[in-house]
Amino acid sequence: MNNRILLTLLVLIASTSVVAAQPKTRSTVRRNPAIANIVREIDARNIEATIRKLVSFGTRNTLSEQNDPKRGIGAARDWLYSEFLKAAEQSGGRMTVEKQSYEQQKAQRVPQPTIITNIVATLKGSQPEATNRIYVVSGHYDSMCGSPTDAKCDAPGANDDASGTAAVLEMARVMAKYEFDATIVFMAVAGEEQSLLGSTHFAEEAKQKNWDIDAMFTNDIIGNTLGGNGVRDRNTVRVFSEGVPSNETQAEATTRRSVGGENDSASRQLARFIKETSEGYVPQMKVMLVYRRDRYGRGGDHIPFLERGYPAVRFTEVNEEFRHQHQNVRVENGVRYGDLPEFVDFAYVANVARVNAAALAGLAWAPARPKNVVILTARLSNDTDLKWEPNKEPELAGYEIVWRDTTSPVWTNSKAVGNVTSFTMKGMSKDNYFFGVRAIDKDGNRSAVSYPRPQGRQQPAPASSSGQE
Ligand SMILES: [Zn+2]
């Protein structure tokens, strides 16, 4: 045997053992025809009509007129309420619509006590085991011109954020007639430009009532496809997700410093789920995962949810045009400023709504994420032992273990392990990969991934025992 043949043999043996350690992923995405129908039914013409109607109220500043039937946020509020009620008519009584109001006391951007009203349309889940699991999708219907406290100026807010509001209303209209296992809340909030006031009120009330909000999506500025940088992109949407949870505890931080996990918050898993699910149903759209909570110097309605421990992400166009955001409508040196409908790409907004709807429907038809997933650390081993609580849903088929290299941004491999509540990945060291677990039902609907926390052996204290391992 010459050296060349020997080398080839060695390479073959080596590559065989790698294949054994990392079984090939079977194609795991199964198409749910109902999700494909939802995606098809979303109509850009409805979205355009909603945006133009919202712009027609002149301003939707939170401090603007609340009782004028034609101009101001009150007129927008009442019109939205009636539109969500129309959507609810298709639900056979499963969707209820309410005006959630409270009096906001004086604050930095609120010069006098002001009533803030969210429009909340709740589509009740039909499965007893899942109906308390809630998915929230929102846009903010308030707007601003150059000053957040100017209640009189024209503030068309066509993109920021009539676009997000229109997407949510269109999803409500289409999805109301479908029966989901879990509950979906379609929401238009106010007071966003006053410092996320409406969404904070909702999130705080949800926390007080101990609601199980499994995911929250905010859609904010989802309609501009020609950026101030001159780039036109009609086929990509950004999904912002935080890595380290906003509500991380000291103990969790200690674990993270020791064994990683800064890319594996529940919000990050949610973002990965959105990409994996939606791109299958909306092939014309690419989901660009952005691994940060929001853009520099900006915030959104997902943040109050994150701060209260609810997984949440933000959808936003890729190339923003700042001459059309938070600007008084005017022409200056031949440049048009202002957030006007002619700068909104309605077909693109519809595509972003489709990405949202595919992911929401996927989540609301899937089993819950596996709870209390742990990676056992009691024994030093080249195997990986995972354990979790059983799901409650009657149509559960089983679970999948997913994994990836520690440097990979998304899950790359999965393995169906059956309807069990523990599994050992033989010959795959927990030190070399990140692992997760997801649930799957008999129709092939998959949950988002749960990332395990370590259980068993204590992590070494920072300095004292670092030389012992
Ligand atoms: Zn906004």
Image: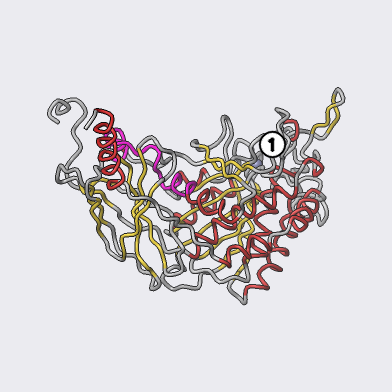
Q: Amino acid at mark 1?
A: Pro
Asked if residue 254 lies in the magenta stretch, the reply is yes
Identify residue for label 1: 148
Counting from the top left corner in percent of width and height, residue 66 is at 74, 52
From the viewer's side, name the closer residue of 287 and 81.
287
Start and end of the magenta stretch? 251-272
Counting from the top left corner in percent of width and height, residue 34 is at 58, 67
**Residue 240 placement, left or right of 192:** left
Counting from the top left corner in percent of width and height, residue 45 is at 78, 57
Residue at the front extreme of this rendering: 1
Counting from the top left corner in percent of width and height, residue 71 is at 81, 50
Q: How many marks?
A: 1
Residue at the left extreme of this rendering: 468
**Residue 141 placement, left or right of 69:** left
Q: Is residue 157 above or below residue 49?
A: above
Residue at the bottom extreme of this rendering: 92
Q: Residue at x 60, y 35 (%)?
A: 108
Asked if residue 98 lies in the magenta stretch, the reply is no
Q: Is residue 177 above or below residue 12?
A: below
**Label 1's element?**
loop
